[in-house]
Amino acid sequence: MDLKGLKTHLLRNKHVISFQDYDQLREDYVRDKKYLRLFGMSPRVFGQIWGEEHLKEMSPRLEQASKKLDNHYEGEYDLWLDGIKIEAKACRAINTKIRGDLVSKALSYSSKDPFWMNFQQLKPDACHVFVFIGVWIDRIVYWVMSRDEVKKSPYLSHQHRGGIEFQIGVTEKNIKSFDKYKTKQEYVIKTILLKARGD
């Protein structure tokens, strides 16, 4: 239970607010922070397992990459859609100015606080399309980029000196630059197909 939840619990126990008021407060709190639970996941579970499963739920055509689908597959990308190789990356928006665990640093989409999302281990030559998933406590944002768009991004940099993996950092300062890649959830699959064709 966080501090706000504890205060509400104490108010209810001391009969300062009615159960109906408490119930409404709780409902408002949960609605405004519907993705807060994702900030409590370990990095691997969130980035790999949740991110990929979340995308696969959008369409039965989206499959886990495997040698069964691609004889040359060696784990270099995540998902497969009608011959299109897709890399899925998920990051959470956290306040970079405060200390604490991810849950305590989690931000709402409308927050003016500084944040940092670092989409890592990018291998542009290993896939056709990237789907970047940005998570705030109250919103999920999807950016769909072709590998060429990723390669040409001014925010792409080497993850390690001399390495073959790259990264893209999204912050409050450059997020508007990614608006042209932003895609509504219901159009993610269609956008993947368009990007793969070079449209």
Image (tube, rainbow, N blue to C red):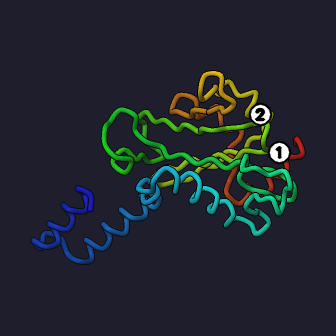
Q: Relative to 104, does residue 169 appear above or below in the rendering?
A: above
- Mark 2 surroundings: few (<14), some (14-19) or many (≥20) residues within 10 A: some
What type is the residue that disc 1 sits on? Lys
Q: How far across and down, in percent of the image, does residue 195 sit? A: 82, 45
User: Looking at the image, which is closer to me, 142 or 122?
Assistant: 122
Q: Quadrant of residue 7?
A: bottom left
Left or right, 183 with respect to 31, comes to right
Question: Which label was assigned to residue 149?
Answer: 2
- How far apart marks 2 and 1 lie (CA) works out to 9 Å
Q: What residue is at 32 percent from the left and 71 percent from the top?
A: 24
What residue does disc 1 label? 195
Which residue is located at x 52 percent, y 57 percent?
45
Going by the image, does 15 lie left or right of 21? Answer: left
Residue 152 placement (x, y as % from top left): 75, 27
At 61% from the left and 49% from the top, the residue drawn is 133
Q: Name the element at disc 2.
A: helix
Question: Left of 84 or right of it: where is 167?
Answer: left
